[in-house]
Amino acid sequence: MSASRWFGVGRVLGLAAIGLLAATAQSAAQDPIRGALENALSGGGAAVPNAPPQGAWGEIINVTDRWLVLQNHAGQQFPIAFDDVQEFLVRWPSSVAEISPQALVEAVGPSPGSNVIRAGHVDFFEQEDRILVSPTYRELLPNNMAVTVLDPGFNRFMNPWDYGGQNMLYGWAYPVPPGMSNNPTRLHVVGSLTQRVPLRISVPGNNQATVLPDQTNRITVTQITMGDPRMVSKGDFAYLLPIEARIRGLRVAQLVVYKTISFRRFVPENR
């Protein structure tokens, strides 16, 4: 084959390659998810970034039925497949007025006694989302360990007079940070709403817990639901607990998407 013919074939292949690169660049610009994946798979650009630390925040900059792209404060973008999320939740701003009698309400906070909780926030779960919690009444020690019927060494039954000493028992049975002492001062309750003002929750043991505002003098309310890709919108913020970063994208133990409107007012995305 003559040199001029080789030159002609090379010119055609070169133009084809340029056209392919231009098409890839255009598709990446139109679809950040595809662009991020193509860049990683082709080996171009920087290496796959490390998984963000536990408790990372980011903004959702694109989302499809199968994928979302999360951008952190440093500008790093992480594709996440919904199939790679172990627990997917959505938090919706709400109010006490929107809690139905069938909902389960959760509150945690300091307790001055008499089943009173001082809390600045409560969550509630409606319908099928109630499987995320169960009716609970639990006293918490200052180190967030639960008050038990048996002492940590399983030597004898505990009684109310032992609660103060249980911190010491936990100290030798299960080491706790220094400075953790005093009697139990916190309650964790989950139950149905029986009264709105003041907010009262029916708890196990045929009892009620009263939730009063903490030092902020207000109680915010969030409805928590199981996640669905149709609930996610561009511009939402998300909190995640990553497992590892791979070329395919992040594997995530938990993804919590924060919405700016209530669940009742939300219209699912049509993609």
Image: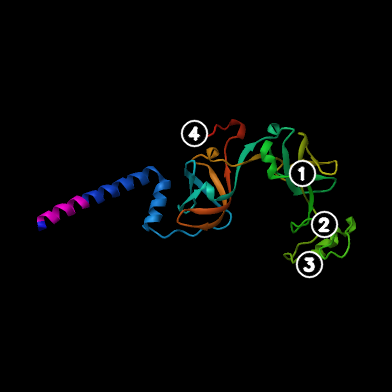
User: Percent from the top left, x then y, of residue 172?
Assistant: 79, 68
Label 3, label 4: how far apart the Cα atoms are: 54 Å
Label of residue 173 in the image: 3
Amino acid, disc 1 = Pro
In terms of depth relative to the viewer, which is nearer, 21 or 237? 21
| Spatial CA span between label 3 and label 1 | 29 Å
Q: Which of marks 3 and 2 precedes in the sequence?
A: 2
Taking the magenta stretch, the answer to whether it contains residue 11 is yes
Residue 214 visible in image: no
Report which residue position mark 1 lands on: 135
Does residue 159 appear in this view?
yes
Dot 3 falls on a residue whose secondary structure is helix
C-alpha gap between disc 4 and disc 2:
49 Å
| Vertical placement of residue 116 versus 268, above or below | below
Q: Tell me: residue 6, above or below residue 68.
A: below
Measuring from the top left, give residue 89's x and y in whole percent: 60, 44
**Distance (Cα) linking label 1 and label 4:** 36 Å
Residue 23 sits above or below residue 101 on the image: below
The mark tally for this picture is 4
Give how far across and how far down residue 151 sits, in percent. 84, 62
Mark toward the viewer: 3 or 1: 1
The residue at 62%/38% (across/down) is 93
Quarter occupied by residue 31: top left
119 left or right of 243 in image: right
The local crowd at label 2, few if under 14, some if 14 to 19, many if 20 or more residues have their Cα within 10 Å, is some
- At x 10%, y 58%, the residue is 3
Residue lying farthest to the bottom in this orientation: 172
Q: Nearer the viewer, mark 4 or mark 2?
A: 4
Residue under label 2, please give it. 148
Query: Are the residues flagged by discs 3 and 1 in contact, CB closer than 8 Å?
Result: no
Name the mark on residue 270.
4
The secondary structure type at the circle numbered 1 is: loop
